[in-house]
Image (cartoon, rainbow, N blue to C red):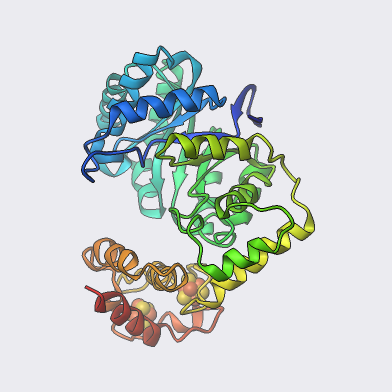
């Protein structure tokens, strides 16, 4: 295993591969029924492979991930061997005292008196505004001072602009966690965001290196592209190597559900040094990216310049789901996400009144209202 350092925490080295606990093995397909015996085997394999970072969060596995992680570390006597990370469920915080109530409940679930890394979970522009009104940043200072948390950061899902606002909005961030993979160079925080954070001394933890598994199960034409390289490599290896090539990345989290996956990914993380990809290897990855991008439905870069829409349409998010459905061949998954996250919340494409206000703001000159109508038809037809 290779180990990397956070710029602001030079005394600490973390394994380049971290164990994400949001896709643990379960019984009978029930997300809350975690198979603890299987999890214990995974943790043993992770520790043996040199993994020193374990990441969980309040909502994972319908709130069962944290207690399982706590019990497993206790049974193995391994709490002191890992850096334990969890996340504050900021969307559940309604008043200032809630911050402490959730953290104290998490410490009890995780059977520990402190978290090595604590994140404000899944920040976007709305949550960022709310949490500041509710004293979220003062809470982080307080929890750090009294020793309940060692290092404070945030995880993120929104536009690049919001990312830089959050980075600049609090001097004491030590790390951030962003979605990043070879398809998301320009999505959310993106490559620019990773560089922006690192330039300010903020360490970067990467999640979704395989884009929810889509980059591990690539179609035949992409397999052929990867097969053109002189050494055989699995698609997941190409994806992980792309992320680990970035010197700003301290740890990449993978939601591994099997012992074999831990062994395979640990072997990759033991060999992938920063800035080690050859130009020809980057070219192979670029060709795979081009294949997927050609399948996009709409050339939306998710820059979010079109926002806010006066009717609350989540324009880039809707286009992202439409593109995902087409690029990764998962229309059912994208449709279900679109309807659950956006239509139900009143921010789907069906709220567009075709007022035209967004049109001149789009640098890609997308006919937004017409394309939204198509996206909605596509993403609702399968249900
Ligand atoms: S055209 Fe539709 S999406 Fe664009 S601003 Fe108007 S309502 Fe919003
Ligand atoms: S529709 Fe245009 S302005 Fe809106 S996010 Fe996409 S590319 Fe940017």
Count of all numbered marks drawn on residues in the image: 0
The extreme right residue here reads: 279
Q: Nearer the viewer, residue 304 or 208?
A: 208
Name the residue at 48% across, 42% down.
Answer: 254
Residue 10 figure quarter: top right
Q: Taking the image as four quarters, which one is ligand 1 found in?
A: bottom left
Left or right of 167 on screen, residue 36: left
Residue 257 figure quarter: top left
Q: Nearer the viewer, residue 134 or 155?
A: 155
Q: Is residue 169 visible?
A: no
Residue 49: percent from left, percent from top: 56, 26
Left or right of 276 on screen, residue 178: left
Left or right of 195 on screen, residue 18: left
| The N terminus: image quadrant | top right
Residue 222: percent from left, percent from top: 58, 67
Q: Nearer the viewer, residue 116 or 208?
A: 208
Name the residue at 30% across, 76% down.
Answer: 349
Name the residue at 52% across, 49% down.
Answer: 209
Whether residue 225 is situated above or below residue 357 in the rendered picture: above
Residue 271: percent from left, percent from top: 69, 37
Residue 72: percent from left, percent from top: 34, 21
| The C terminus: image quadrant | bottom left
Whether residue 374 is situated above or below residue 17 in the rendered picture: below
Q: Is residue 341 visible?
A: yes
């Amino acid at each position: 295993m290779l180990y990397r350092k956070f710029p602001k925490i030079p005394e600490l080295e973390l394994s380049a591969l971290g164990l994400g606990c949001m896709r643990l093995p379960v019984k009978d397909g029930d997300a809350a029924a975690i198979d603890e015996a299987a999890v214990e085997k995974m943790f043993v394999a992770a520790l043996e492979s040199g993994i020193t970072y374990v990441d969980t969060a309040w909502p994972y596995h319908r709130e069962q991930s944290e207690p399982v992680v706590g019990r497993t570390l206790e049974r193995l006597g391994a709490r002191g061997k890992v850096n334990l990370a969890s996340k504050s469920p900021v969307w559940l915080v309604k008043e200032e005292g809630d911050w402490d109530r959730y953290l104290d409940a998490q410490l009890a679930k995780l059977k520990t008196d402190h978290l090595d890394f604590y994140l404000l979970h899944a920040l976007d522009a709305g949550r960022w505004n709310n949490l500041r009104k509710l004293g979220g940043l003062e809470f982080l200072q307080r929890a750090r001072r009294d020793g309940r948390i060692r290092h404070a950061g945030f995880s993120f899902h929104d536009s690049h602009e919001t990312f830089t606002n959050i980075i600049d909005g609090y001097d004491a961030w030590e790390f951030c966690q962003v979605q990043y993979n070879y398809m998301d160079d320009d999505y959310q925080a993106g490559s620019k965001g990773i560089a922006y954070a690192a330039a300010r001394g903020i360490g970067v933890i990467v999640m979704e290196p395989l884009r929810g598994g889509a980059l591990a199960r690539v179609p035949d034409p992409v397999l052929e592209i990867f097969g053109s390289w002189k050494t055989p490599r699995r698609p997941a290896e190409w994806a992980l190597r792309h992320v680990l090539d970035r010197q700003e990345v301290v740890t990449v989290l993978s939601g591994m559900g099997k012992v074999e996956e831990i062994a395979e990914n640990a072997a990759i993380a033991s060999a992938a040094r920063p800035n080690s990809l050859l130009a020809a290897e980057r070219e192979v990855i670029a060709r795979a990216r081009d294949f997927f991008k050609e399948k996009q439905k709409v050339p939306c870069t998710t820059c979010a310049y079109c926002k806010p829409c006066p009717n609350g349409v989540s324009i880039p998010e809707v286009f992202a789901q439409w593109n995902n459905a087409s690029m990764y061949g998962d229309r059912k998954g994208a449709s279900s996400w679109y309807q659950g996250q956006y239509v139900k919340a009143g921010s789907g494409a069906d709220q567009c009144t075709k007022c035209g206000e967004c049109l001149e703001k789009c640098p890609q000159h997308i006919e937004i209202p017409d394309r939204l109508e198509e996206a909605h038809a596509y993403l609702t037809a399968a249900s």
